[in-house]
Amino acid sequence: MTRAPDWLQTVMLWTSPAFPVGAFSYSHGLEWMVESGQVTDRSSLEALALALLEFGDLQADASFLCAAHQSDMETLPSVLEEAVSLRGASELAAESVNQGRAFIKALQSEGSDYPRLSALQNTMSDVGIPHAVAFGAACADAGIPLEAAVESWLHGAVANLVSAGQRLIPLGQKDGVAALMTLKPLITKFAQKAMETPLDRISSASVAVDLAAMFHETQYTRLFRS
């Protein structure tokens, strides 16, 4: 009987809804898109997730995760600088950095050593660390393979978007599971793309999401922080 690798439960824990990064409180602009009638059902939610995976923030963040995982101590700060600068709205920046801060705090509380994260905090103490960068660096420190790291992170991000859609549209559990099953092969596809994207080619072009996040700042009734 083949034994599962030691890192498997670690990466499952780090991407679990139970891990205290506060992902449940962010909708990545979806709340405004539902309010304005742009996302109304499972089909339009899947279309939004696909756009984010193909050329939006999820693709960019997955690529930064890969860059952080593959970087050494000298090049890691440049990955962080690029990741921090590539945000189209203040709420999206806060969403990323706040989750990164919570992720690092949770790791520090367990007492393990994560040299890459420590190096980032020591050299870039005045800059918040986006969740994807922190996750990629921590996975490298923990010996979690790149492919498993990026695909797990993307699945967690997409699952959180679908969960937000279930609460906002609303959608039932059956539709939520169906959406995740539809998006499953796309997560694998765009995880591979992220692994092949060099740092100087990372970009994001999800303008509708950026605008939704801006409008969300003044939305009268809100359940989510973004």
Image (cartoon, rainbow, N blue to C red):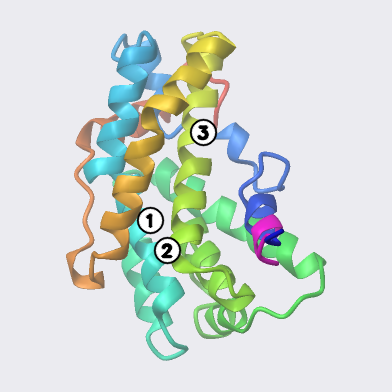
Magenta-colored span: 4-9
Label 3, on which residue? 159
User: Disc 1, disc 2: CB below 8 Å?
Assistant: yes
- Give the numbered dot on residue 28: none
Label 1, on which residue? 62
Mark 1 falls on what kind of element?
helix
> As drawn, is 131 to the left or to the right of 218?
right
Query: At 44% across and 87% down in the image, what residue appears?
Result: 72
Residue 197 falls in image quadrant? bottom left
Label 2, on which residue? 65
> As drawn, is 107 to the left or to the right of 140?
right
Mark 3 and mark 2: span between their CA atoms?
18 Å
Q: Residues within 10 Å of mark 2 (few under 14, many from 20)?
A: many
State which tag comes first along the sequence, 3 or 2: 2
Type of amino acid under label 1: Ala
State which tag comes first along the sequence, 3 or 1: 1
Residue placed most toward the observer, 10 or 26: 10
Q: Residues within 10 Å of mark 1 (few under 14, many from 20)?
A: many
Taking the magenta stretch, the answer to whether it contains residue 13 is: no
Q: Quadrant of the N terminus?
A: bottom right
Q: Position of residue 119 (x, y in %)?
A: 56, 84
Type of amino acid under label 2: Leu
Mark 2 falls on what kind of element?
helix
| In the image, residue 87 above or below residue 164 | below
Q: Main secondary structure of the magenta part?
A: loop
Q: Position of residue 183 (x, y in %)?
A: 38, 31
Q: Position of residue 87 (x, y in %)?
A: 32, 51
> As drawn, is 111 to the left or to the right of 41?
right
Mark 1 and mark 2: span between their CA atoms?
5 Å
Type of amino acid under label 3: Ala
User: Disc 3, disc 2: CB below 8 Å?
Assistant: no
